[in-house]
Image: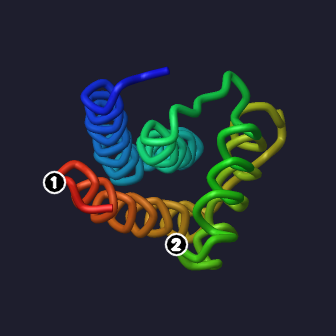
């Protein structure tokens, strides 16, 4: 079990990682690498979720475990809006298809939507994490 200081360190690190992934997603998009941009947009969301869950001493080796725990603790409880759950689900499906389906072709428009969703999730979670880091519940 992590103490408060370690939880904050993990949350900060994971949020920084999410921000880097979001920056890379934008660069890849600008370069026309839509499949790879979807991957990085998903990971921006995934690491954002892990940043929040650090405050609960929760992590999982399975992506589905992180997603379901975040939904249970933060979306069902009304901390974050329901639409965030849909964005997370969409990013998970598209990332899996982009990474594992041989014939999956993603459009520029779909990729832009995934990056926009990742920006939204990251921004909302960053606000929450910044409040928690400042000592506000």
> Quick check: 131 left or right of 99?
left
Q: Which mark is residue 80?
A: 2
Quarter of the image for residue 85 reads: bottom right
- Which residue is at 44% across, 48% downward? 52
Above or below residue 73? Residue 84 is below
- Local crowd size for mark 1, using a 10 Å CA cut-off: few (<14), some (14–19), many (≥20): few
Q: Which mark is residue 134?
A: 1
Q: Which mark is residue 51?
A: none
Give the camera-side residue of 5 and 114.
Answer: 5
Above or below residue 99? Residue 74 is below
- Which residue is at 40% across, 46% downward? 25
> Quick check: 43 left or right of 12?
right
- Local crowd size for mark 2, using a 10 Å CA cut-off: few (<14), some (14–19), many (≥20): some
Q: Where in the figure is residue 107, as x and y percent of width and height?
A: 63, 62
Quarter of the image for residue 78 reads: bottom right
Please tell me whether mark 2 sits on a helix, a strand or a loop: loop
Give the camera-side residue of 34 and 70.
Answer: 70
Question: Quadrant of the image for the C terminus?
Answer: bottom left
Q: Where in the figure is residue 2, as x and y percent of width and height?
A: 42, 23
């Amino acid at each position: 079990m992590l103490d408060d200081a370690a939880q904050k360190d993990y949350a900060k690190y994971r949020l920084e990682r999410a921000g880097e992934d979001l920056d890379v997603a934008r660069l890849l998009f600008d370069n026309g690498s839509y499949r790879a941009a979807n991957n990085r947009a998903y990971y921006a969301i995934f690491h954002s979720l892990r940043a929040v869950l650090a405050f609960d001493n929760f992590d999982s080796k399975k992506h589905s475990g992180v997603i379901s725990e975040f939904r249970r603790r933060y979306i069902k409880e009304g901390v974050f809006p329901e639409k965030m759950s849909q964005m997370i689900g969409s990013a998970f499906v598209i990332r899996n298809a982009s990474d594992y389906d041989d014939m999956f072709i993603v459009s520029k428009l779909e990729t832009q939507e995934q990056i926009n969703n990742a920006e939204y999730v990251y921004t909302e979670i960053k606000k929450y994490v910044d409040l928690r880091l400042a000592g506000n519940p």
